[in-house]
Image: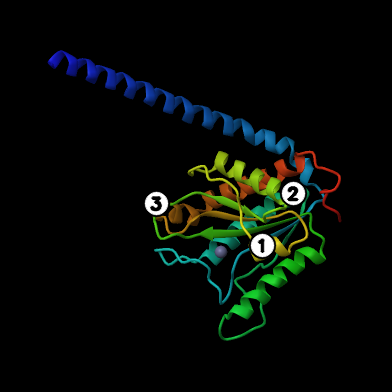
Amino acid sequence: MHKILHIVYVKKGCILALSLLIALLVIGFQRVSSRYEEPAISALSWTVANKLIVIDPGHGGLDPGALGSMGVHEKDIVLDVSKKLASILREAGAEAVLTRETDQELSDPGVNYTYSAKIQDLTRRVELANSRRADVFVSVHVNSFPNPREDGAQTFCQPGSEESKKLAMAIQNECNRFLANQGRKTQQVDYFANRMTKMPSTIVEIGFITNPREEKLMLDQQYQSKVAWAIYAGIVRYFAQPKSAIAEPSR
Ligand SMILES: [Zn+2]
């Protein structure tokens, strides 16, 4: 009986040690591979040169977006990250246009932020991208969920839009590579901004404000730069992919 138990414990110990070793190797590999990915992205940065990227920091003004436990508003985090993303893109030679530069809603001034104000606000964001004939539209948001354990960045695109799916998946892959999260997958969901934009477009939910650890991270300037870099890397990868003639974005 004791001997059997002993063998079981030894076996369990071996399995534990082995899985620990594998976990360490995987983490080590991810670290090394992401370090080598950065020069690879820089080498591909020419793909965004002269591209017009409209970056849409979600919400603003009377519309705070999601609220964190520390009293942080989604609208403020996404504006910071969007500005950082814009400067990385500009450095690479892209033209980056923000739908808002300050803490403001895009609807006509009003006391209350009504449903029709929200639609007007969203329509103006989309119209900016459509009228400028942007090459891609990237809307930056922060997620929230009742379960505080949910975390990670996730991208969304319009069902049926293959180019948007490629863009969303490229950004998702880089977020999974550069940011610590659960390895979420791109989802195809019918959202107003993605449906109404005429170019490849995606909504990037950079993390969960309802997760205390992630809320803290998203307030950190360095982490915000990391998020901006991951989105940038995804945009670069998207433009580096060969595209079909029909889906080629036009200017
Ligand atoms: Zn939002």
Cβ–Cβ under 8 Å for marks 2 and 3: no
Q: Quadrant of residue 76?
A: bottom right
Closer to the eye: label 1 or 3: 3
* Position of residue 203 measured from the top left corner of the image (x, y, whole percent): 63, 57
Quadrant into which the N terminus falls? top left
Residue 106 seen anywhere in this rendered image of the structure:
no
Question: Residue type at mark 2?
Answer: Glu
Question: Helix or strand or loop: what does disc 3 sit on?
Answer: loop
Say how many tags the image has: 3
Closer to the eye: label 2 or 3: 2
Numbered tag placed on residue 163 in the rendering: 2
In front of the other: 78 or 166:
166
Of marks 1 and 2, which one's residue comes earlier in the chain?
Answer: 1
Of marks 2 and 3, which one's residue comes earlier in the chain?
Answer: 3
Residue drawn at x 55%, y 41% is: 176
Question: Helix or strand or loop: what does disc 2 sit on?
Answer: helix
Q: Is residue 110 above or below residue 52?
A: below
Q: Is residue 57 above or below residue 171?
A: below
Cβ–Cβ under 8 Å for marks 1 and 3: no
Residue 149 seen anywhere in this rendered image of the structure:
yes
Q: Which residue is mark 3?
A: 149
* Position of residue 42 measured from the top left corner of the image (x, y, whole percent): 70, 38
Numbered tag placed on residue 56 in the rendering: 1
Question: Residue type at mark 3?
Answer: Arg
| Spatial separation of the CA atoms under disc 2 and disc 3 | 32 Å
| Spatial separation of the CA atoms under disc 1 and disc 2 | 18 Å
* Position of residue 70 measured from the top left corner of the image (x, y, whole percent): 40, 64
Question: Residue type at mark 1?
Answer: Asp
Question: Helix or strand or loop: what does disc 1 sit on?
Answer: strand
Numbered tag placed on residue 84 in the rendering: none
